[in-house]
Image (tube, rainbow, N blue to C red):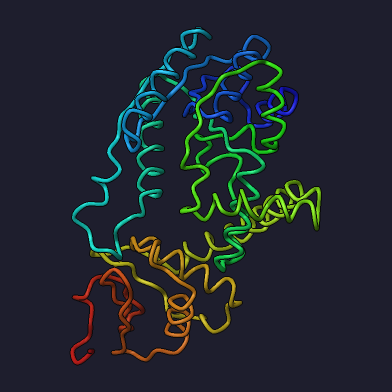
C-alpha cells in the first residue's frame, strides 16, 4: 500500500507541497493519514488533517471527532475540525430542488475542507477514495442508466487540481492488510453497511459475487474502464469548449445561442453543448437525456417565435437573432 500511495502522490505532484488530509476516522482515511505521515520525510510533505463533523449520529459523531483529535496528536499532525448541518441545506426547498442528505453532506464537506485548506495554506486536499469506491461508483452509474461520462467514475484529481485521491488505485483489502500490519485503530460507521443505501447493498451483496463468479480482477477492470472513459471525455470536452466559445454568449441575464449549423453537428457533440448550456443556467441536477434530446431537436428545427419550457423555470426561445435561454420572461406571447 505504501508503494502505491507513494506512486500516487508523485503522479499527482504532491512532493514538496502542503496537503490537508480529509479524515473521517474510518479505516481508509486513517490509513491515508498514517501512510502520508510515514512518507512525509521522503516526499517533503507539509501535512495537516481536516475532519468534518456532520452531526448525524449524535454521540457517535462526537466520538469520531474525539478519536481523530487523539490520533492526529499522536502523529504530531495539526488537526482542524469543522461542524456542519446538512439538514439545514435541505430546508425550505421544493422536492425537485432539494439535495438528498448524501448530496448535502458531500457539498458541505468539500466546502469545509476547502476552507480549512485555505486557512492552513495547504495546496491540496487529499481524500481516501479507493479502488473499491471507484468500482462501486462505476457499477452504480451503470445500474442507474448513466451516460458515457458517468462511467468515468471518480477522477484522481478535481478539475482545478485542488482535491487529489492518491489511494484510488489501492484496494480496500490492501488497506486492511496495511492497517492490520501497523496495528492501526479506526472507527466504524454502521451506515456504511446499512441496506438502506444502494452503495452499501452493492458493496455487501453484489460486488463479492461478481468478483468470485465472473472476474477476480474486477476492481482493476472497472478502474481501467473509468480511466479510459475519462480520457475520452476530456478529449470531447476540448471540442465542446471550442464550439461553446463560438456559439454561446451571455447578455442581459440570459444565454444567447448562435442558430447556425446545429443540424450539421454530430449528435454527441450537440448533446454535450446542450448540457453545457443547461448546466450553465443552473439546472444540472434536473437535466435528463430527454431534456437534451428536446433541446437539440429544438435548436435544429425551431422557427422564430417558438419556445419550450425546461426544468428550473427556464425557457429556450427562438428569436430572430438566435436562441435565448433564460427565465420565463423570454416566453413569446401566446406560448403556453
User: Residue 88, how many percent across, how many down?
Assistant: 23, 45
Snapshot quadrant of residue 269:
bottom right
Above or below, 155 against 19 in this view is: below
Image x and y of residue 127, in percent:
53, 33
Q: Which residue shows up at 54% across the image and 61% down it?
A: 242
Of the pair 95 and 62, the residue shown nearer to us? 62
Q: In this view, does 162 lie to the left or right of 203?
A: left
- Placement of the N terminus among the 4 image quadrants: top right
Residue at 32% across / 34% down in the picture?
A: 55
- In the image, 115 versus 257, the foreground residue is 115
Query: Where does the C terminus fall, quadrant-wise?
Result: bottom left
Which image quadrant for residue 13? top right
- 221 above or below 44? below
The one of 315 and 168 positioned closer to us in this rendering: 168
Tell me where residue 253 appears, x and y as whole percent: 24, 63
Q: Residue 105 placed where, x, y %?
A: 37, 43
Q: Which of 132 and 318 is in front in this view?
A: 132
Give left or right: position of 303 versus 330. Answer: right
Give the number of marks.
0
Task: Report the residue at 23% width, 77% height from top.
Answer: 330
Amino acid at each position: 500500500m505504501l508503494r502505491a500511495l507513494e506512486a500516487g502522490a508523485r503522479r499527482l505532484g504532491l512532493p514538496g507541497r502542503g496537503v490537508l488530509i480529509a479524515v473521517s476516522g474510518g479505516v481508509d482515511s486513517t490509513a491515508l493519514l498514517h501512510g502520508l505521515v510515514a512518507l512525509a520525510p521522503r516526499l517533503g510533505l507539509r501535512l495537516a488533517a481536516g475532519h468534518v463533523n456532520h452531526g448525524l449520529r449524535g454521540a457517535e459523531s462526537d466520538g469520531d471527532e474525539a478519536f481523530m483529535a487523539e490520533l492526529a496528536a499522536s502523529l504530531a499532525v495539526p488537526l482542524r475540525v469543522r461542524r456542519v448541518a446538512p439538514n439545514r441545506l435541505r430546508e425550505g426547498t421544493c422536492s425537485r430542488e432539494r439535495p438528498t442528505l448524501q448530496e448535502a453532506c458531500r457539498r458541505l464537506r468539500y466546502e469545509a475542507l476547502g476552507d480549512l485548506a485555505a486557512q492552513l495554506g495547504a495546496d491540496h486536499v487529499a481524500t481516501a477514495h479507493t479502488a473499491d469506491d471507484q468500482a462501486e461508483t462505476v457499477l452504480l452509474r451503470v445500474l442507474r442508466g448513466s451516460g458515457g461520462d458517468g462511467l468515468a467514475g471518480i477522477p484522481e484529481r478535481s478539475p482545478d487540481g485542488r482535491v487529489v485521491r492518491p489511494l484510488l488505485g489501492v484496494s480496500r483489502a490492501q488497506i486492511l492488510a496495511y492497517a492490520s500490519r501497523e496495528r492501526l485503530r479506526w472507527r466504524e460507521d454502521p451506515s456504511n453497511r446499512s441496506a438502506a443505501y444502494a452503495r452499501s447493498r452493492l458493496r455487501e451483496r453484489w460486488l463479492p459475487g461478481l468478483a468470485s463468479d465472473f472476474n477476480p480482477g474486477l476492481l482493476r477492470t472497472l478502474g481501467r474502464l473509468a480511466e479510459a472513459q475519462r480520457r475520452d471525455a476530456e478529449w470531447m470536452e476540448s471540442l465542446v469548449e471550442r464550439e461553446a466559445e463560438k456559439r454561446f454568449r451571455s447578455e442581459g441575464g440570459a444565454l444567447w445561442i448562435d442558430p447556425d449549423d446545429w443540424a450539421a453537428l454530430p449528435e454527441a457533440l450537440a448533446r454535450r453543448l446542450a448540457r453545457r448550456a443547461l448546466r450553465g443556467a443552473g439546472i444540472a441536477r434536473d437535466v435528463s437525456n430527454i431534456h437534451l434530446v428536446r433541446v437539440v431537436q429544438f435548436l435544429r428545427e425551431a422557427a422564430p417565435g417558438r419556445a419550450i419550457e425546461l426544468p428550473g423555470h427556464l425557457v429556450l426561445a427562438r428569436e430572430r437573432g438566435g436562441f435565448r435561454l433564460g427565465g420565463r420572461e423570454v416566453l413569446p406571447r401566446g406560448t403556453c
